[in-house]
Image (spheres, helix red, strand yellow):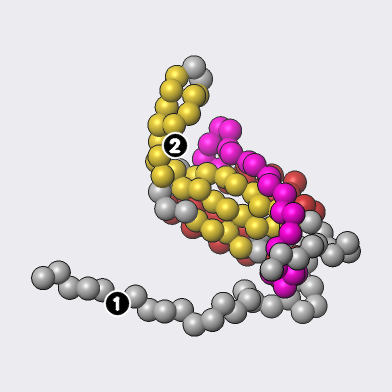
Amino acid sequence: MIAEKPGDMPTTVIVLTTVADDALAEDLARVLVEERLAACVNLHPPMTSIYRWKGAIEHAAERQMVIKTTDEHVEALKARLKALSSYDLPEFLVLSVDGGGAEYLKWITQNVGAPRPDASTRPQRGPRRSVSKRSRG
């Protein structure tokens, strides 16, 4: 079920950026959550990016980061990413979230910026299933 954003709630946004290596991706994600600039950061598996840079076609292995925050924290997040990025021109794309689960949107709002009453850990998603390794035969 899609819920409208309540009027008194900051707007949830998704910020996309990329980093050059796995260690930086995990370190940066942890810093952003610890500093409450992001409620959650998803790290996609390594991918290949092809782009034009300084007149030449380049390709590089990168990790895409999906950062969940609110519009109130975009400028501080942008400054922090620029300070910590290894790139001359870091990707910084802000996508508006038009709706979503009301409780999830509330959780994002509660977990960015100064701690708020009722801020809790990540919403429960139910038990995780363990994946057993199959032996090769």
Mark whose residue sits in front, 1 or 2: 1
Instruction: Spot the residue most to the top.
Output: 55
The quadrant of the picture occupied by the C terminus is: bottom left
Amino acid beneath label 2: Ser
Is 33 inside the magenta-drawn segment? Answer: no
Q: Earlier in the sequence, mark 1 or mark 2?
A: 2
Please state the horizontal and vertical placement of residue 34, each as a whole percent of the image: 63, 64
Residue 75 appears left or right of 86: right
Residues packed near mark 2 inside 10 Å, few (<14), some (14 to 19) or many (20 plus): few
Which residues fall within the magenta stretch? 85-106
Amino acid beneath label 1: Ser
Above or below, 60 against 41 in this view is: above
Please state the horizontal and vertical placement of residue 130, each as a whole percent of the image: 37, 79
**Mark 2 lies on residue:** 49
Seen from the viewer's position, the closer of residues 107 and 125 is 125
Q: Number of labelled discs? A: 2
Residue 86 appears left or right of 7: left
Is 88 inside the magenta-drawn segment? Answer: yes
Could you tell me which residue is drawn at 46 percent across and 79 percent down? 128
Residues packed near mark 1 inside 10 Å, few (<14), some (14 to 19) or many (20 plus): few
Do the CB atoms of the residues marked 1 and 2 lie less than 8 Å apart?
Answer: no
Which of the 4 quarters of the picture holds residue 2? bottom right
Instruction: Spot the residue most to the bottom.
Output: 127
Could you tell me which residue is drawn at 60 percent across and 47 percent down? 16
Q: Is residue 28 at least partly visible in the picture? A: yes
Disc number at residue 132? Answer: 1
Please state the horizontal and vertical placement of residue 57, each as a whole percent of the image: 43, 23
Could you tell me which residue is drawn at 77 percent across and 52 percent down? 71
Above or below, 2 against 65 in this view is: below
Q: CA distance from mark 1 to mark 2?
A: 33 Å
The quadrant of the picture occupied by the N terminus is: bottom right
